[in-house]
Image (cartoon, grey):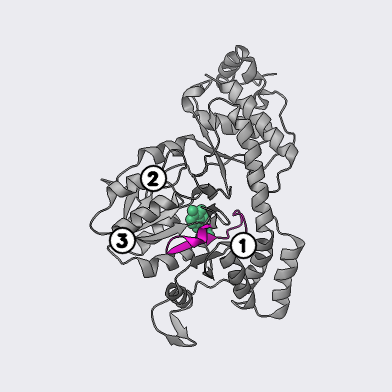
Amino acid sequence: MLRGVTGKLIMASNTITGRPQLAALALHGGTPVSNQRIQVVAVRLDEADIDAALAVMRSGMLAQGKNVAELESLFAPMSDAAHAIACANGTCALQLAYEPLIEPGDDVLVPAWSYIATVSMLVARGANPIWVDADPVTYCIDVEDARRKVTPRTTAIAATHMYGNPVDIGAVDTLAAEKGLAVIYDAAQSHLATYNGKGIGAYGDAVTYSFYPTKNMTTGEGGLVTTNDAELDVMLRSLRSHGESEKYVHARIGYNYRMTDVEAAIGVQQLKRLPEATARRRENAATLDRRIAEIPGLHAPVTTSKAQHAYHLYAVRIDTDAFVTPDDGPSIRQHFQDALLAEGIATAIHYPRSLTRQPVFDVPGVDHQPVADKLAQTLMCIPIHQFLTDRDLVLIGDALAKVADAYRA
Ligand SMILES: Cc1ncc(COP(=O)(O)O)c(C=O)c1O
């Protein structure tokens, strides 16, 4: 049954009549694959999380305290790092990590494909971003492109483990050693990811994490830095709390970027369940990988060699040449999103534009990056979280296949 009520829709209907797969879409009145919406993210607190938060609230010791210390002492070894410093959010974590490692005026190699905080906190530090393109396969920073762009004033590289997929750490290490660069990894999306058999906390000068609600584990708002450098650990703790070297002795200008104990109590419980949740995300990804391999024109994420992905997000790449839009309307990706939603599958775009296209960075002469620009048009995130059932995974695969068939060129 077609919904031809306006001129535009009737035009679409005529197109649909000639394409039975298009008419079968729930978007055009067909039967949806799933009667219930499968959400792209699921934020859930367990009773254990709530009990832990309540216990802190009842204790009256709300500010940074023993729960923050417990979260740090659990998180560091789980990431193969020597030290963990919890803080207010992932953006503060970046700001803390950048401050001791980067000086105002330094050139820093940055990914054009990341969340804005990776770069905005560098600019807040007074550094000059040197834009580096994305690797078209892993979506992380292209280390060879970074090498080509090193300037005499380049002192550091900031690299994001995108969507949970570790960057090529071996290549970053080699470049950093050759050019004498500090290395800061943004792992806001990549808790418990590994590289070469070790947690990602084992690598670089500092690694930052976010515990925002949609992340693989949450504290509400929250963040953390790991490092293997004992001096940096002391410095970060000081910067986190007004530059204190001891109580009411302020050795430097610092901030109040502390995490509360209520947040940390939730985090400790979440962290205890994180290995199991991550294992489930990986199983879900393996199932979806198999389904997507059978759908021409769609591409599953590719894990960096020697790495283990944490699947915060599962980004499907749409080969735009493999599909056609039925009208002069929105992009093929928008058609996919609308059609999938009607089938009961929510999707999300991370991100709709590369960082050099953000108004704040898109200044005259900015160095736009073609791969990152292309990713902004062709990636679409589908549900991957640990609460998906086996049936949900079948339905997601069925919906992808149905929609891809409908729009196939
Ligand atoms: C890659 C990346 N970096 C940094 C952040 C900032 O973290 P937060 O939202 O906790 O400040 C995020 C969170 O969205 C992120 O995805």
Determine the image quadrant of residue 391. Answer: top right
Of mark 1 and mark 2, the one earlier in the sequence is 2
| Whether residue 242 is visible | yes
In front: label 3 or label 1:
3
Number of marks present in the image shown: 3
Say which residue appears at 66% left-offset and 50% top-offset.
279
Q: Is residue 243 magenta?
A: no
Q: Secondary structure at mark 2?
A: loop
Q: Secondary structure at mark 3?
A: loop
In front: label 1 or label 2:
2
Of mark 3 and mark 1, the one earlier in the sequence is 3
- Amino acid bearing label 3: Gly
Q: Give the residue at the far front of this rendering.
A: 197
Is disc 1's CB within 8 Å of ligand 1?
no
- In the picture, the disc for residue 220 is 1
Position of 105 with respect to 44 (left or right) is left
Examine the rendered structure and indicate whether residue 245 appears above or below residue 52: below
Say which residue appears at 59% left-offset and 30% top-offset.
293
Q: Is residue 208 magenta?
A: yes
- For the N terminus, the image quarter is top right
Q: Which residues are magenta?
A: 199-218
| Residue 115 x %, y % | 46, 51
- In the picture, the disc for residue 142 is 2
Label 1 environment density (alpha carbons within 10 Å; few <14, some 14–19, many ≥20) = many
Say which residue appears at 64% left-offset and 18% top-offset.
21
Determine the image quadrant of residue 80. Answer: bottom right
As measured in the structure, the alpha-carbon distance from the residue carrying label 3 to the one carrying label 2 is 18 Å
| Label 3 close to label 1 by CB (< 8 Å) | no
- Amino acid bearing label 1: Gly
